[in-house]
């Protein structure tokens, strides 16, 4: 697929999202709740940040997509997450799982692994360490941050260095995790979206995005909004990653540091136009 066709496809999803204004139910951490809701609103979706167990059945019935984020886990919230993901699996509701801090201690890694078993058509979006912890048992997460680069993650996921593996072949370590998902997103300087037999690399974004908390969490919620209007998780993940990266890049061009990055990012999501996607998208499509 040519870059122009991919940009066109992403724009179609973006336009559909703005037309339909999907209701995205987000159960996320205490750190990023407000900025995630604002990012979804700016994008054109309708956020609902609720984690009450008593609300779960109703929210499951009315929402168009679900985003589950384990950043600040407490037992009651984890059990609501399981119920919501289980209901979403039954009704084939689009789900994104953000395994914040997977690989940083047994507690979080176990929670993330357990949640991976629910809602088989979900997108799993994490930074390189989080995805490698789940896919390959590679423990390198520092708190909520990645201890490895996307390139190192690609090497770990493909089984690089093993004599029976070609480093450019199907991501091997990712395949078992991918069996429990419709797409995996490994974010970072270059984002990788992995699906069955295909991968898209997107090189948008800015270093500043690593200096502001919650950019990954917002990316996951944005992928959930796109999943509500996409035919599959892979296309939704590509669109979510591209739009987040382009808005981040444009926002970073206007600021000198992280302090004002966030409001500019929200503004750029709000003001994003078709021409921006065509002009700024830096993506490569690989098929295996
Ligand atoms: N060095 C970087 N250059 C460009 N974009 C980046 C960089 N670091 C992070 N990003 C972007 O920030 C967002 C969050 O990614 P990441 O920092 O990997 O997630 P998390 O916040 O969960 O650790 C993604 O959109 C990613 O593309
Ligand atoms: C700092 C922090 N601590 C617990 S959750 C959280 C936010 C993590 O956000 P992100 O994964 O998007 O950087
Ligand atoms: Mg994160």
Image (cartoon, grey):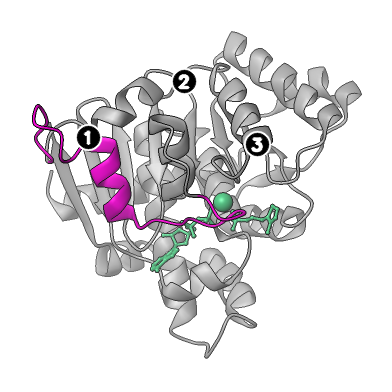
Q: Is residue 64 magenta?
A: no
Q: Secondary structure at mark 2?
A: loop
**Few, some or many C-alpha atoms within 10 Å of disc 2 (few <14, some 14-19, many ≥20)?**
many
> Quarter holding the N terminus?
top left
Q: Is residue 271 left or right of residue 161?
A: right
Given this view, does label 2 or label 1 mark the residue nearer the observer? 1
Q: Secondary structure at mark 1?
A: loop
> In the image, what residue occupies the spot 40% across and 42% down?
185
Q: Which mark is residue 159?
A: 1
Name the foreground residue: 93 vs 260.
260
Q: Is residue 173 left or right of residue 76?
A: left
Is there CB contact under 8 Å for labels 2 and 1? no
Q: What residue would you read off at disc 3? A: 108
State which tag comes first along the sequence, 3 or 2: 3
Majority secondary structure of magenta residues: loop
Residue 173: % across, % down: 30, 30
Given this view, does label 3 or label 2 mark the residue nearer the observer? 3
Locate ligand 1 by image quadrant. bottom left
Residue 110: % across, % down: 62, 27
> Quarter holding the C terminus?
top left
> In the image, what residue occupies the spot 41% across and 39% down?
132
- Beta carbon at label 1 within 8 Å of ligand 1: no
Q: Is residue 61 left or right of residue 266?
A: right
State which tag comes first along the sequence, 1 or 3: 3
The alpha-carbon separation of the residues under discs 2 and 1 comes to: 25 Å
Q: What residue would you read off at disc 2? A: 121
Residue 4: % across, % down: 17, 55
> In the image, what residue occupies the spot 82% across and 29% down?
75
Q: Which residues are magenta?
A: 141-167
State which tag comes first along the sequence, 2 or 1: 2
């Amino acid at each position: 697929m040519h870059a122009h066709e991919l940009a066109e496809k992403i724009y179609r999803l973006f336009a559909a999202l703005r037309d339909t204004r999907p209701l995205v139910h987000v159960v996320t951490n205490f750190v990023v709740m407000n900025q995630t809701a604002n990012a979804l609103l700016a994008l054109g979706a309708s956020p609902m940040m609720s984690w009450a167990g008593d609300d779960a059945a109703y929210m499951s019935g009315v929402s168009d997509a679900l985003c589950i984020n384990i950043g600040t886990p407490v037992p009651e919230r984890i059990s609501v997450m399981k119920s919501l993901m289980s209901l979403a699996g039954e009704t084939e509701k689009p789900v994104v799982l953000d395994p914040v801090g997977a690989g940083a201690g047994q507690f979080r890694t176990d929670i993330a692994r357990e949640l991976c078993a629910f809602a088989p058509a979900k997108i799993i979006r994490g930074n390189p360490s989080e995805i490698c912890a789940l896919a390959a048992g590679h423990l390198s997460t520092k708190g909520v941050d990645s201890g490895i680069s996307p390139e190192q993650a690609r090497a770990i996921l493909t089984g690089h260095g093993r004599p029976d593996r070609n480093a450019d072949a199907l991501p091997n370590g990712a395949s078992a995790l991918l069996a429990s998902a419709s797409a995996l997103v490994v974010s970072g300087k270059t984002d990788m979206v992995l699906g069955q037999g295909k991968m898209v690399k997107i090189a948008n974004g800015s270093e500043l995005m690593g200096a502001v908390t919650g950019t990954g969490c917002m990316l996951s919620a944005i992928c959930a909004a796109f999943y509500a209007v996409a035919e599959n998780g892979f296309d939704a993940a590509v669109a979510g990653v591209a739009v987040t990266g382009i808005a981040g890049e444009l926002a970073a061009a206007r600021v000198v540091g992280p302090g004002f990055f966030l409001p500019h990012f929200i503004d750029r999501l709000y003001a994003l136009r078709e021409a921006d996607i065509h002009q700024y998208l830096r993506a490569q499509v690989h098929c295996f």
